[in-house]
Amino acid sequence: MDERLKIYEEKMTKSFDSMMRDFAGIRAGRANPHVLDKIKVDYYGTPTPVQQVGNVSVPEPRMLQIQPWDKSLLKAVEKAILTSDLGINPNSDGSVIRLVFPELTEERRKELVKDIKKKGEAAKVAMRNIRRDANENFKKLNKASEISEDDQKELETKIQKITDKYVADVDKAVEEKSREILTV
């Protein structure tokens, strides 16, 4: 592949991966340890991911259990979960924290699907912006006589094909995640 295209494809890959990480945090009534990915605990003055301060397990389909390695962190982990946008109250018994995920209502599922579609649309906009930047760069290269007009057209065609592939991947991922959320 042309080096000039590679950097733009890498940017599109990063946009797609970012969207997929966002999707991993959207729960479908089942407990998924990835919902904790963005939650940081104050660990001796350093914001640290929950997974790095304790053991996270899924003892039941709708429950996450967090067992901090250092018992003194129990309150800090609880506080981090309460202040996050998770919307779940942690239950603590002094040694472990349990997060019980309620069944999703149909209304909440539809809200989540809207959110998924919004994130998918944002990813597609990001990819189109990357394509636009690439095309502007190709025009500059042509103006500077570094590439011919035919090369410019060929690069623009190739970046369009790459963009189309990623947009299709986004649509497919949005469809799959929406189906997962709507499945009761």
Image (tube, rainbow, N blue to C red):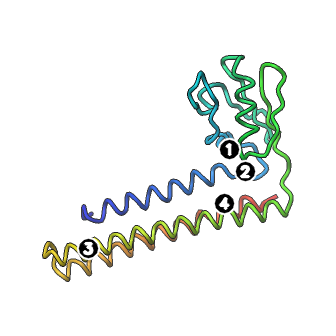
Asked whether the residues under the numbered discs 1 and 2 touch, taking CB atoms below 8 Å apart as contact, a structural biologist would say yes
Q: In the rendered image, which residue does mark 4 sit on?
A: 177
- Other-residue count near label 4 (Cα within 10 Å), few / some / many at <14 / 14–19 / ≥20: many
In the rendered view, would you say 46 is above or below 184? above
Q: Which residue bears the numbered disc 3?
A: 138
Q: Where is residue 135 in the image (x, y as percent from the top left)?
A: 32, 75
Mark 2 → mark 4, Cα distance in angstroms: 10 Å
The picture places residue 50, in percent across and down from the top left corner, at: 64, 32
Give the alpha-carbon distance from disc 3 to disc 1, as whole Å. Answer: 41 Å
Question: SS of the residue at dot 4?
Answer: helix
Mark 2 residue type:
Arg
Which residue shows up at 81% across the image and 60% down it? 108
Q: Is mark 3 on a helix, strand or loop?
A: helix
**Residue at 77 percent of width and 32 percent of height:** 59
Which image quarter holds the C terminus? Answer: bottom right
Helix, strand or loop at label 2? It is: loop
* Type of the residue with mark 4: Lys
The Cα atoms of the two marked residues, 4 and 1, are separated by 15 Å
The residue under label 2 is 27
* Residue 35 circle label: 1
**Alpha carbon separation for disc pair 2 and 3:** 42 Å
Whole-number angstrom distance, CA of label 1 to CA of label 2: 7 Å
Q: What residue type is labelled 1?
A: Val
Residue furthest out toward the top: 71
Q: Whole-Å distance between the Cαs marked 3 and 4?
A: 36 Å
Q: Earlier in the sequence, mark 2 or mark 3?
A: 2
